[in-house]
Image (cartoon, helix red, strand yellow):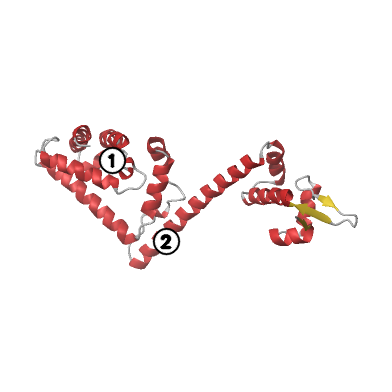
Amino acid sequence: MEWTIQELAARAGVSSRTLRHYDSVGLLAPSRVGANGYRHYDAAAVVRLQRILLMRGLGMSLPAIAGVLADEVDTGDGLRAHIAALEEERDRIERQIRSVRHTLESLQAGVEPRMDIMLAGFNDRYKDEVISRWGERAFEAGNDWWHGKTLGQQRDWKRDTEDLVAAWVAAVRAGESPVSEHAQSLAARHVRWLSQIPGTPTADGDRERSIEMVTCIGDMYVDDPRFGGMYDDAAGARFVRDALHAYARTRM
């Protein structure tokens, strides 16, 4: 099939003048020019135009686009790269939508929006760290799960988390041993809490990686002050670590 320059311009949402300009700078030549001087474009030309428009949408200059197309060996590879870039942009926009929705719901409920949620999609604070430890799928699944919650659901999750932390602190203050039945029941509760987060090994039922994750998280509570402070003091963080380690060794 072939399309005239007017047909292609109308379908692409550009002007015929733009298509002529793309021809003049060597970006998109017509497939053929009729005896009457009319320009015609075949499917391969439309594919090339699609790619030009995608790169223009990403803010690339015409010379830069020309360089990409000139250096490319396989059109399929180029299209796959476009798909990956578009999917990444789609995910970023979806996170921003959820962030703005959180802000709106918070304001309507008369409460102060959380800054970390408001800026999700604009600056994912722990993205690189989560991906380095557990993979990109874990980050995306967990991020989508959290920001897909309503404000009320986020409050419920935060309350459940605070209850778990308080139970750990109470066990430490009561002088429990990390391997006591009570401490091990808290460790089991902790693992169930982790298993609610999509993308984690505990949610996926991957036993070996779950053991590794639980052990790693226990270490993190001691090694990383951002998390260790949750459990009252360093002794509390060590107690949680030792209990999780024992649970991972003997009960998972």
Q: Is residue 245 above or below residue 42?
A: above
Residue density around tag 1, few if under 14, some if 14–19, many if 20 or more, within 10 Å: few
Q: Earlier in the sequence, mark 1 or mark 2?
A: 2
Task: Give the x, y percent position of residue 251.
Answer: 19, 36
Q: Is residue 34 visible?
A: yes
Tag of residue 227: 1
Q: Quadrant of residue 40?
A: bottom right
Query: Pointer 2: what residue?
Result: 101
Front residue of 156 and 38: 38
Give the residue at x 83% y 50%. 32
Task: Give the x, y percent position of residue 92.
Answer: 49, 51
Give the residue at x 76% y 50%. 22
Mark 2 lies on a secondary structure that is helix
| Residue contact at pointers 1 and 2, CB within 8 angstroms | no
Task: Give the x, y percent position of residue 153.
Answer: 31, 59
Front residue of 242 and 237: 242
Q: Is residue 174 above or below residue 13?
A: above
Mark 1 lies on a secondary structure that is helix
Under mark 1, the amino acid is: Phe
Q: Is residue 229 above or below residue 90?
A: above
Whether residue 2 sits left or right of residue 35 in the image: it is left
Q: Quadrant of the N terminus?
A: bottom right
Q: Nearer the viewer, mark 1 or mark 2?
A: 2
Whether residue 226 sits left or right of residue 186 in the image: it is right
Q: Is residue 13 visible?
A: no
Q: Quadrant of the C terminus?
A: top left
